[in-house]
Image (cartoon, rainbow, N blue to C red):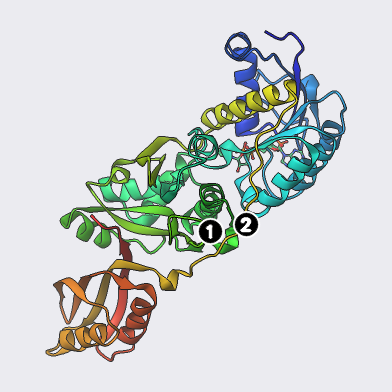
Amino acid sequence: MSSIPIRLGILGCGNVGAALVKIIAEDQRLIEAQTGEVLEIAKIAVRDVSSSRPEWVPTELLTDDPYSVVDDPSIDIVVEVMGGYEPAKDLIERSLRNKKSVVTANKTLFSDFGEEISELASSQGRDIFFEAAVAGGIPLIRSLRVSLAAERLRRVTGIVNGTTNYILTRMAEDRLSYQEALKSAQQLGYAESDPTSDVEGVDAAAKAAILASIAFSRKVSLGDVSRDGITSITLDDFDFAKRHGYTIKLLAICEWIGDSEGDSGKISVRVYPAMVPFTHPLASVRDAFNAVFIEGDSVGELMFYGRGAGGLPTASAVLGDIIDAAHNLRYGTTERHVERSIGQLLSIDELTSQFYIALDVSDKPGVLAQVATVFGRNGVSIMSMEQVGLGQDARLIFITHQAKESDMKKTLDDVVGLDSAKRLVGFIRVLPG
Ligand SMILES: NC(=O)c1ccc[n+]([C@@H]2O[C@H](COP(=O)([O-])OP(=O)(O)OC[C@H]3O[C@@H](n4cnc5c(N)ncnc54)[C@H](OP(=O)(O)O)[C@@H]3O)[C@@H](O)[C@H]2O)c1
């Protein structure tokens, strides 16, 4: 057991930072007994030192100058839990240049600059750890990076945004409209007053980029991820889904498409709401929980489940990283740096899927035949069809067989151009059963 403490500089003392300070203070003995590391918080940078803080935060350690933390030669590890691009990026890079290892929970920054920052860490002989950046408290990144490092992974499918999973769960189970469910999420503190990043799939796409980079050892950034959000999902969609044995989830899908050997494969990274069969393990992930379903050639199917956000779960993941970084510093080693090649990304247009389509049309003879002709002309085969009367109009609901995304898009463009078509009211991809 070592007695020389590892000194920490923490950038940020909000939800995650304050929870981390609490765990380190309360569990100091346990941490030392289980890991042999003694952690000492040296400084905590915040924006406003006069803001009120939880009683366990030692106010004498607070500073509003984050550079005094990253430039302090006595600090061994910098923990970045302030968020955003700048000054977080500059502070992380400066910490690494100052020969400190860094732990961050910053998915936004990491999804865009993860590779650049990792290369800098490697060149400085220091670690950059980011377990908490994806799926909060779930030990996913380390599992992908270490335990599954030699596995040929085929697909990583995740519910990685707790806010949208909560909204979709309330819609499915309590029949709340999207707006009512969003309001409930905001009241519970799951959604921000501006929920755009969550409901438009940006947050999930940032996590998908990080997951794909690690799972497939390729450079993937946020801009590479094709993305649809959940704002157009309706209770009618849920009713149809339920009748046919599905629920609706916002999925982040990272997929390896191609040979099992070498580098010849392409990858696809996408985020969209999908109809998920009740029999799929992800269908039972409710409320604000996260889960990630992994498929690999040798390992088969794996599922990770837990709290994807919240101060304490996220701080727990950060603490695990701190312990790893502390061990490495003590033994003069670092995490293995994986050189990532440029990802050959497959456009979503080239993928195939089944689709659910709901279309309002004039309720006149011959309309169904017109619509079906458009599907057939574009090579999209209909698996099932329902018609619901709406007075003067009718709603046609289709599930297609597997079809190419580009063919489906062309079909929709052509269908909404028909005189008899009123509105496209539903369009959701369907996961195979
Ligand atoms: N919350 C979660 O459940 C969760 C889950 C996974 C990952 N994360 C990630 O963890 C990070 C932190 O999230 P959070 O929820 O803890 O954020 P937060 O509650 O908003 O806290 C941010 C902290 O950073 C400080 N800060 C911001 N800008 C600063 C600056 N320029 N200089 C010095 N201090 C600054 C703030 O100071 P003041 O207190 O003075 O304002 C605050 O203490 C983010 O990257 C987030 O994406 C969060």
Give the position of the C terminus as an image quadrant: bottom left
**SS state under label 1:** loop
**Residue 123, picture quadrant:** top right
**Residue 256, picture quadrant:** bottom left
Q: Which residue is mark 2?
A: 341
Give the position of the N terminus as an image quadrant: top right
Disc number lying in front (1 or 2): 1
Name above or below for residue 124 compared with residue 72: below
- Residue depicted at 62% across the width and 38% down the height: 130
Q: Position of residue 321 (x, y in %)?
A: 62, 29
Q: Nearer the viewer, residue 99 or 394?
A: 99
Task: State whether label 1 is within 8 Å of ligand 1.
Answer: no
The amino acid at mark 1 is Asp
Q: CA distance from mark 1 to mark 2?
A: 9 Å
Say if mark 1 contacts mark 2, CB within 8 Å.
yes
**SS state under label 2:** strand
The amino acid at mark 2 is Ser
Direction from residue 155 to residue 340 in the image, left or right: right
- Residue depicted at 72% across the width and 28% down the height: 333
Mark 1 surroundings: few (<14), some (14-19) or many (≥20) residues within 10 A? few
Direction from residue 83 to residue 430 in the image, left or right: left
Q: Which residue is mark 1?
A: 263
Q: Position of residue 204 (x, y in %)?
A: 50, 52
Mark 2 surroundings: few (<14), some (14-19) or many (≥20) residues within 10 A? few
Q: Position of residue 287 (x, y in %)?
A: 37, 40
Query: Looking at the image, can residue 28 be seen?
Result: yes
